[in-house]
Image (tube, helix red, strand yellow):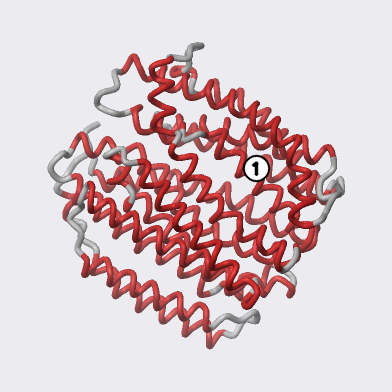
Amino acid sequence: MSLLRVLLRESFIYGVGDFCLKLVAFFTFPLLAASLSTSGFGLLELAMTIVSLGAVFVRCGLNNAVQRFYWDQNTHVFERPLVVSTGFFITLTFGVIFGTIAFFFAPFVFIISDGNAAGLGSIGVVSLSILLASTQWAQYLQDILRLHFSPWKFLGFAFCSRALGALLSVVAVIYCGWGAEGVLFAQAFVLLVAIPLGLRLIKSDLVFKIDTVWARRLLAFGAPFIFTELAYWLFASIDRWMLASMAGVDDVGVYSVAFRFSTLAVFVATAFGMAWSPYAVKIRSDFPEKHRAVYFEVLLILLVVMLIVAGTIALFAGELLGLLLPAEYFAAAVPLAVLSFTAVLQASQQVTAIGISLVNKTKVFAYLVWSAAVLNVALNWLLIPIYGVSGAAWSTAVAYVFLSVGFLFYTQRYYPLPVSWKRLIWICMLGGVVLTVSVLFQQRVLDFRIIAIKVFIAIIVLMLALPALKLSVFRENSLIQ
């Protein structure tokens, strides 16, 4: 089976499954947003940023480390259960520690940031603390299932741990009237019930032992990712906290709606990443002479696919919001268009950063991401007072551009790929055209004349992008099973 066909097949499986999961979340979050109001939805999003911050320390880069070493040619088959088990028990321990810390400190964060002493009650704080730990335990199990090349098991576990939580959240808010705390409680409860299932699915790689040698290797490789992921947390979260302090929780709710809709583009990148990350190292071993060319051509294909998905969402952001949400959320249209294109940049980093990872220069990730995070904070500070929610979105986009360029620069320095700059710049320019049209032609009502113009532009851009792809490199290689 050809390499491209394998990647497409598994990306399709992950993509369809992830799409179904996100479809559940997509249809539930407007119900939550409408029921909670902009301020209530903003409070929920702030709570989730605390969960994502604690998750950085619970993970400690162990997911990345296990993926790096599991299929490495120097890791013997009998060592793989030790790698997986050691990583899991460390993650389990960190989850208990940082979940406990969150229980005591989370209430003070709400008071300091927004003066809202009653932001979350005791049930909400307990649920937040449990969710912080259990989310990462579940994520670790999902990553191991990907290493097993078991997309169907992965999707089954993901449905039990994620989709059921989203559905139960709607029940908690709409039928029980529990508010933002109900969402946190429902998701934490579902994850705790689902984790035993995940453990059963990876039982072939589980032993009740922590190998000290592998513990040191995994932590040495993964620990630098803490600093990198803290900076990524700033990308994903600091704009909301700055909006809360500089503009109010209502603007946080509007921005969060834009962010949630932009995840429709992110799910394609996520689907690709699920299929790509285990194969990236394997391709290097199987095709030592041609794997770099494969990496670059995968990058171009990924950019074009993401341009199609993100461009469609961006072009019709206003109409989408107008159909699904009250008029007060139309202010999210331009931010949604901009954030959709940050998904393109985020997806590209799975390839542009590969050289840095392969030569174990993980400190470079920390330096680059922190530089981009500082840039993001500075731009938010400058642009939010002037442009509000749109300023926060543009700040994030500029920071992602800086980061993606930096990743490619250092990959070319440490592990150069045969880059065709002409083709790469051409695709990026076409993306810029779609983004410009998206920002200038947002509308809430359905004007079919404007819609026709947008569709025509999208088709032209796609036709101009396709000749930049070179698929012959995949026909020249076959994946060794």
Residue 31: where, in percent of width, then height? 74, 57
The residue closer to the viewer here, 87 or 192, is 87
Q: Residue at x 52, y 29 (%)?
A: 141
Q: Which residue is mark 1?
A: 51
Residue 254 at x, y = what percent? 69, 66
Quadrant where the C terminus is found in the figure: top left
The location of residue 58, given as percent across then percent down, is: 57, 33
Residue 443: image quadrant is: bottom right
Residue located at (24% from left, 55% from top): 297
Q: Which of 383 and 306 lies nearest the eye of the viewer?
A: 383
Left of 190 or right of it: where is 401? left
> Which residue is found at the position 48% from the left and 23% from the top?
202
Residue 362, quarter of picture:
top left
Viewer can see residue 85 = yes
Residue 32 seen by the camera:
no
Residue toward you, 232 or 345:
232
Residue 394, compared with residue 59, is above or below; it is below
User: Which residue is located at x 35 percent, y 74 percent?
Assistant: 430
- Residue 390: x %, y % from top left: 59, 73
Task: Farthest residue to the bottom: give it.
Answer: 449
Q: Is residue 186 left or right of residue 311?
A: right
Give the amino acid type for the residue marked by disc 1 in the picture.
Answer: Val
Secondary structure of the residue carrying tag 1 is helix
Label 1 neighbour load within 10 Å: few <14, some 14-19, many 20+: many
